[in-house]
Image (spheres, grey):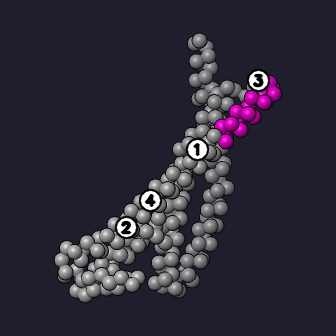
Amino acid sequence: EKAFYFGTEWWISVWTEAAESSIQFMGVWFPPQTDGQSAQYEYLKIYAILLVLGFICAFFRTVWIVSGGIRCSKKLYSMMTHCVLHSPMVYFETTPMGRLLNRFTYDAEILDVTLVWSMSMLLIATSWFMTAVVVMVVILPWMLVVLIPISICYIMIHFHYRKSGADLQRLDALSRSPLQTMLAEGIEGSA
């Protein structure tokens, strides 16, 4: 998808180079822009094709991510339901109903909303990064000397955050449970 975005930007630069003289691209001659609207139409046609291909790629990326999120959500929900329904009775006696509800709703929310959004952002950011790296390395090959240490530093920071991120998520889940337990007990008491 980002390749087509880069292609549109590149095509605009080719288009502007042909202000006074004709240019050749992939064996096809394009007239200079001074030839009027018919010449502009030829450039605009290629630009529109690149845009449409970019939109099609973005659409299929979105469909792929959402369908993957739905598959993950269905699988996790059926696995969670199976595990809870086949749990021994002592589990239900020691675990508050609010904590069970919290776990089900929180995990479903993470898969339905957060995972799909995160995967979409991951693919977009990765494609932007790869496109930028390719353009930088093509223009200035010595940029690899700078990019490799920066990438290693980034990976080290990433692993450091992931260790603390799991603990923060666990604390967040524990802080939600008392509220949902109190709400569930209040609803049960009023019935």
Disc 3 crowd rating (10 Å Cα; few below 14, some 14-19, many 20+) is: few
Amino acid residing under circle 3: Glu
Give whichever of discs 1 and 3 has the lower sequence position. Answer: 1
Q: Nearer the viewer, mark 4 or mark 3?
A: 4
> Considering the numbered disc 2 on the image, is that residue within a helix, a strand or a loop?
helix
Residue at 65% across, 53% down:
164
Question: Label 2, label 3: how many angstroms apart (C-alpha)?
Answer: 63 Å
- Residue at mark 4: 56
Name the image quarter holding the C terminus.
top right
> Mark 4: few, some, or many residues within 10 Å (few <14, many ≥20)?
few
| Label 1 vs label 2, nearer the camera | 2
Please tell me which of labels 2 and 4 falls first in the chain. Answer: 2
Q: Which residues are magenta?
A: 75-91
User: Dot 2 corresponds to which residue?
Assistant: 49
Q: How packed is label 1: few (under 14 Cα within 10 Å), some, or many (20 or more)?
A: some
Question: Taking the image as drawn, is residue 133 in sight?
Answer: yes
Q: How much space separates mark 4 and mark 3, taking CA atoms?
A: 53 Å
- The tag earlier along the polypeptide, 1 or 2, is 2
Of discs 1 and 3, which sits in the foreground? 1
Q: Amino acid at mark 2?
A: Ile
In the picture of the structure, the residue carrying the numbered disc 1 is 70
Give the x, y percent position of residue 117: 52, 50
- Front-lying residue, 37 or 169: 37
The answer to which of marks 2 and 3 sits earlier in the sequence is: 2
Q: Main secondary structure of the magenta part?
A: helix
Q: How many marks?
A: 4
Q: Secondary structure at mark 4?
A: helix
